[in-house]
Image (cartoon, rainbow, N blue to C red):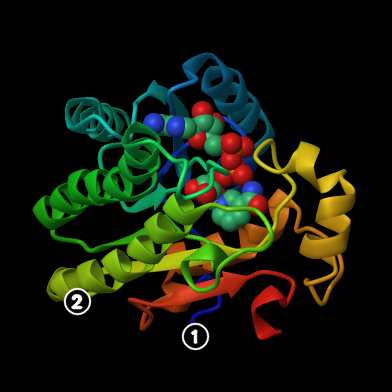
Amino acid sequence: MGENSFCLKGKAAAVTGGAQGLGLAMAEALAKARASVALLDINVEKCQTEAERIRSECGVETLALRADVRKLDEMEAAVAQIVERFGKLDIFVNNAGVCKNIKAEEMTLEEWQEVIDINLTGVFIGSQVAGKQMIKQGSGGSIINIASMSGSIVNVPQPQCSYNASKAGVIHLTKSLASEWAQYNIRVNSISPGYMKTAMTEKTLETDMAKDWWLRLTPMGRPGLPHELGGAVVFLASDASSFMTGADLIIDGGYTVW
Ligand SMILES: NC(=O)c1ccc[n+]([C@@H]2O[C@H](COP(=O)([O-])OP(=O)(O)OC[C@H]3O[C@@H](n4cnc5c(N)ncnc54)[C@H](O)[C@@H]3O)[C@@H](O)[C@H]2O)c1
């Protein structure tokens, strides 16, 4: 392994859902490893503030773009702007996602579809626009999909079948794309976090339910913090993981071992 194989200097990265939470923390980790970073989100104002902060704190180029992962045209336009500004695209993190806790027998088709559209179809769209650009460049790349431990296990006690199904889909989509794009030296891997403290979970983590179920079932007995995914995303983005593709890195404080 080369001395600087974790270094991302000269690489151009993008993170969807980059305005806050895990996406923002991963964008910061990539910037600290010296990559230029584009934050993509439907909340572009927050992206602008954070992109400016990362630029001044890390001394790398940053970009804030409004892009809904469900919209192919918006995602194509975002990649075009990244390439115009950074000259290329090497690392793409499909992170945007939502969760709905609704009983299966009560869920409307619209509610089901929204989760699948953002969490699964959004990852396909992001991968397709990034993969096409990487294939065109001819220099390979790394696509990192944020799945969840919910893609391998069923969370209890809250009902979330659409989320669980979408994340299982992300893990298998990751393997499928890894198989198709290995010939272009594009590596595609996923990260599957357990319970992490973000806007998605913050309020629930304060409840007795979370203490009785979520934290009791986590061997480490606590939620993960967003920055605790930083090492994994830099590893998967960098040459340190050059022989790794189609893999799912579970980072869950041990939840899935029980
Ligand atoms: N927080 C957890 O415990 C946890 C655990 C496992 C996996 N995850 C996954 O990690 C990812 C990030 O979650 P988080 O906890 O940071 O959530 P979050 O709600 O804090 O942030 C999600 C971000 O995605 C953006 N977003 C939502 N819909 C979008 C769309 N259509 N297009 C573009 N951006 C959109 C939001 O504006 C927001 O900035 C999600 O895919 C989530 O499923 C989270």
Where does residue 128 sit, x and y in percent of width and height?
Answer: 19, 49
Q: CA distance from mark 2 to mark 1?
A: 24 Å
What's the residue at 31%, 28% (across, down)? Answer: 85
Query: Do tag 2 and tag 1 residues touch (Cβ < 8 Å)?
Result: no
Q: Left or right: 136 with respect to 31? A: left
Whether residue 126 appears in this view of the structure is yes
Q: Earlier in the sequence, mark 2 or mark 1?
A: 1
Q: Residues within 10 Å of mark 1 (few under 14, many from 20)?
A: few
Q: Which residue type does callout 1 highlight?
A: Met
Q: Residue furthest top?
A: 45
Please say if 36 is above or below 30. Answer: above
What's the residue at 53%, 64% (across, down)? Answer: 150
What kind of element bears circle 2? helix
What kind of element bears circle 1? loop
Q: Residue furthest left?
A: 136
What's the residue at 14%, 71% (across, down)? Answer: 180
Please say if 24 is above or below 240. Answer: above
Q: Left or right: 136 with respect to 16? A: left
Q: Left or right: 24 with respect to 65? A: right
Task: Name the residue carrying label 2.
Answer: 179
Where does residue 13 sit, x and y in percent of width and height?
Answer: 40, 46
Most foreground residue, 69 or 1: 69
Q: Left or right: 8 with respect to 178? A: right
Q: Residue furthest front?
A: 105
Task: Name the residue carrying label 1.
Answer: 1
Q: Which residue type does callout 2 highlight?
A: Ser
Q: Residues within 10 Å of mark 2 (few under 14, many from 20)?
A: some
What's the residue at 19%, 54% (across, down)? Answer: 131
Please say if 129 is above or below 147. Answer: above
Task: State which quarter of the image contains the C terminus.
Answer: bottom right
Tell me the mark number nearer the camera, choosing from 2 and 1.
2
